[in-house]
Image: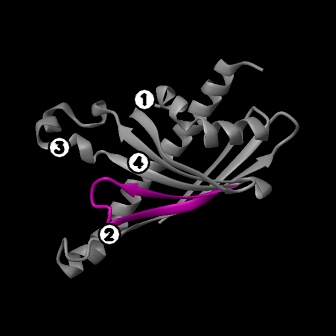
Amino acid sequence: MDIIVDSKIPYPRERVYSALRDHMPDLAQFLPNVESITVKERNEPAPGIVDLVNLWKAARTEIPAVARPFIDQSKLNWLDRAHWTASDWTCAWSLEVGFMPERVKCSGKTTYEEDGPLSTRMRLRGTLVLDLKGLLPGLIARTATPSVEAFIVKLVQPNFAKTVDAVNRYLAQQGP
């Protein structure tokens, strides 16, 4: 299932790119469904290349109150593996969810384009693949998978948009 998010951010590309690459933990305060973002690994194997592994923890408020006693909060997280390439203003990424990581695959690429001297066009393209084989009987899995994928994409896509809102708020807080 495809994930497509196009956003215009009213800040220069360099600031947007740097904020999302270098200050993601600072953006967590602006994401209502995220408790924290922690940089687990950061490598710079060559000039202009940054490889990051960030751990995102979902806010406890994302779990319905009635379900909280039954849900392992430690599984409500995801690893964001990102390969930032400054020469073409891109970030190739993949997400690994804390629950059922072997069944949910999500990856893509985000491109940052100048949209005038003081604005950035962010284009995110990704895919989400859900594997329910072995979890449900074959026919049910084949029938249910597209519907469940569509449901998850409808949940995930707004989170990418909320990240755009967060970078806007973060950059506004930083001043000119």
Residue 87: x and y in percent read: 79, 56
Q: In this view, does 76 lie above or below 108?
A: above
Give the labeled residue for mark 1: 32
Number of other residues with Cα within 10 Å of mark 1, as a class: few under 14, some 14 to 19, many 20 or more: some
Residue 155: x and y in percent read: 41, 48
Asked if labels 2 and 3 touch by Cβ distance under 8 angstroms, the answer is no
The amino acid type of the residue labelled 3 equals: Ile
- The residue that appears at 51% across and 34% down in the rendered structure is 25
The amino acid type of the residue labelled 1 equals: Pro
Give the labeled residue for mark 3: 71
Label 4 to label 1: alpha-carbon separation: 14 Å
Asked if labels 4 and 3 touch by Cβ distance under 8 angstroms, the answer is no
Sequence-first tag of 3 and 1: 1
Residue 34: x and y in percent read: 40, 34
The amino acid type of the residue labelled 4 equals: Leu
Give the labeled residue for mark 2: 145
Sequence-first tag of 3 and 2: 3
Task: Please state which of residues 60 and 159 is positioned toward the viewer in this rendering.
Answer: 60
Is 111 left, or right, of 95 in this rendering?
right
